[in-house]
Image (spheres, rainbow, N blue to C red):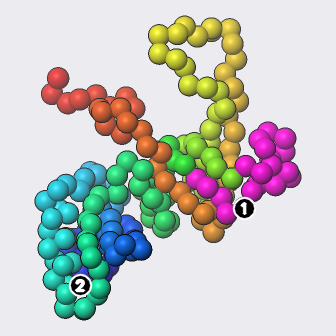
Amino acid sequence: MAQTVAGLGYELVELERTGGGTLRVTIDFPWQQGEPERQVNVEDCERVTRQLQYTLEVEEVDYKRLEVSSPGIDRPLRHAGDFERFAGELVDITLKAPMGAAAAAGQVAANRRKFRGKLEKAGEGWQVVWSDEPEPVPGQKRSRKKEPAALQALGFSLDELKEARLAPIVDFKGRRPGVQEQGK
């Protein structure tokens, strides 16, 4: 199936088979560093669906329904290339095992496994950087005298992750904060 998707110029992000016979296929455009980001649209999904229906029929794969979609705003990160592509973005990670008391050093709960923060490269591995300061309430004034909460960082390797996803941010103006609409 990955070969069929790649042959059409897409990348297979995720493949899931449900108990009810639904086959879910998630596609994206392959990432090329330095090239503009392209988004999967309905026509792309339609094109892949038609080709996969033919391929699945030829290979006699049993399924009741085929769903082809884009990765969405909470895209899973699975491979090293995904982490390179989305470095600097806000991510949600879940560790396979809790950090433990020694790793936490009293900063966070030792049994904590889920973190949300900015993804950064750290030597041979990765780290997520966050602040436990609550988000400001719109319209509420912030004291300039109050010290901001310290940033915390957790280093990890891809082997330690159970799951990693882009944090779903809905702002209706684009994923990156501060990006202005062009032409206005």
Residue, far bottom: 59
Give 119 or 22, whichever is nearer the viewer.
22
Residue 122 horizontal/vertical position (percent)? 62, 54
**Could you tell whether 140 is left or right of 2 in the image?**
right
Give 135 or 36, whichever is nearer the viewer.
135
Residue type at numbered disc 1: Ala
Q: Is residue 102 magenta?
A: yes
The magenta stretch spans which residues? Answer: 93-112
Residue 153 horizontal/vertical position (percent)? 68, 44
Q: Is residue 124 visible?
A: no
Q: Is residue 5 visible?
A: yes
- Earlier in the chain: of badge 2 and badge 1, it is 2
38 vs 79: above or below: above
Q: Please tell me in which quadrant of the rendered image residue 15 appears.
A: bottom left
Q: Around disc 2, counting alpha carbons within 10 Å, would you say few (fewer than 14), some (14 to 19), or many (20 or more)?
A: some
Image quarter in which the C terminus is found: top left
Image quarter in which the N terminus is found: bottom left
Q: Which residue is mark 2?
A: 56
Magenta residues, dominant SS class:
loop
Q: Around disc 1, counting alpha carbons within 10 Å, would you say few (fewer than 14), some (14 to 19), or many (20 or more)?
A: few
Name the residue: 70% across, 17% down. 147
Total marks placed = 2
Residue 63 horizontal/vertical position (percent)? 29, 80
Q: Please tell me in which quadrant of the rendered image residue 35 appears.
A: bottom left
Name the residue: 29% across, 85% down. 62
**Could you tell whether 117 is left or right of 89 in the image?**
right
Q: Is residue 104 magenta?
A: yes
Residue 179 horizontal/vertical position (percent)? 32, 31
**Could you tell whether 101 is left or right of 134 in the image?**
right
Name the residue: 39% across, 32% down. 177
Could you tell me which secondary element the residue under label 1 belongs to?
A: loop
Q: Which residue is mark 1?
A: 97
